[in-house]
Amino acid sequence: MDSREVMGVEDSHLAPVYKKFQVVLSKGSGSVVWDQNGREYIDCMAGYGVALVGHSNPHVRKAINQQLEKITTCHGSFYNEARSEALLALDRICPPNLRNYFLCNSGAETIEAALKLARRATGRKKLIAMTGSYHGKTMGALSTTWSRRYRDPFGPLLPQVEFVPFGNVGILREKVDETTAGVLLEPIQGESGIHSASEEFMLEARKSCDKVGSLLILDEIQTGLGRTGDMWAHQAYGVTPDILCSAKGLAGGLPAGAMITSQKVASSFRTGDHTTTVGGSPVVCAALKATLEFIEKENLVGRAKEMGGIFFDGLENLKAKHSAIREVRGKGLLIGLETRFDIRDILLSCMRRGLLLLYSGRNVLRFLPPLVIEPTQIKKALAILDKAFGEAEGNMGIG
Ligand SMILES: Cc1ncc(COP(=O)(O)O)c(C=O)c1O
């Protein structure tokens, strides 16, 4: 099929829920992807952060191929070696007190599991989430997602979900009480513009939960696995959650999620409480183990810090040059660049020039490149951004 045929089939057959870019991606390697016509792009969106260890990572590919020769599916009611090995790999990177896993297929699924477990473990109903949050679009996750654009058309959602202004210590302290099952938050909010929780706010979340016996649930679906320069973003705060949610790049690009908790909290679940037919399949588990091995072997956590520093400094230089750029923020390779205008044209202009980027709100560009991105690729990306901002400012008569 040529590009036009591919786009035609998808446009007429897929549920119309994605805003499509007119590009057919057909190949990827590391931090680079190619379209059907052989055009090359530096990928700083990485499928919303999924290509964490790079596209078509050879180590992950080999593990998948080897597992495909053995067995591809094995329901959770049977045992499987690839799954056991994946669990031991998770053990190596997870906080010492969190060594129990519910394996599933996506980020939202980990949130669903976490919300149910919080209710089961505490026998309470109330859930606290944050303004600006994004936890996914299944009904439970959606109920804790802030944007009314996503929530309003689908009510009634879960009852007894209350939102606390992200960062407001006083309101958080007030709202978390003996009826609260869990407090759910992202250490760094991605969807609403790359905003980090303050240390004070994270410490208060832990303290308030401890005081009344609620569970602290951290959504590290975007911030985890080295993205911010720590294996988990929460480590920088010295706060450990009761439940940790991980997904996106967990299995090198295959669909995977893990709800991670302690043996004690997990033991509240009863047989049949929460299951998924294909979660923890051997092929995904083999990919998961290989992904975690690669992150460790290549020190991608340190690399995210180092490359993030190079990217951040380069963006700060662009800010000094272009008055349209208001602020650069974030941590490691999770970076937001706030502009004084809607960034749609910048995004499209970068795409035309061979750079893929993400929105994070109307006037924030989000950078979520693979952690294997090279300094030369960062340099190229910065040069493209420089041109795109120069052109946009010229068109608007500013700068
Ligand atoms: C912080 C966060 N939580 C939850 C989700 C939902 O994950 P999924 O799209 O895999 O369901 C996302 C996805 O972007 C996310 O960034």
Image (cartoon, rainbow, N blue to C red):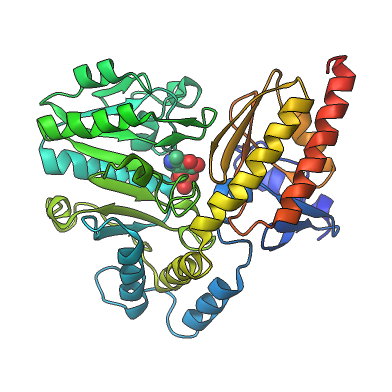
Q: In the rendered image of this protein, does residue 6 appear above or below residue 350? A: below
On-image quarter of the C terminus: top right
Residue lying at 42% horizontally and 25% vertically, measured from the top left: 146
Residue 295 vs residue 324: left or right?
left
The tally of labels here is 0
In front: 317, or 116?
A: 317
Give how far across and how far down residue 280 sits, in percent.
36, 65
Give the percent coordinates (x, y) of residue 208: 18, 28
Residue at image coords 56%, 74%: 59
| Screen quadrant of the N terminus | bottom right
Residue 142 shown left or right of residue 78 in the figure: right
Residue 157, visible in the rendered structure: no
User: Which quadrant of the view contains residue 174?
Assistant: top left
Residue 13 appears at what percent x and percent y? 66, 47
Position of 144 compared to 60: left or right?
left
Picture residue at 10% right of the left edge, 37% below the top: 123
Examine the rendered structure and indicate whether residue 164 appears above or below residue 293: above
Q: Nearer the viewer, residue 156 or 113?
A: 113
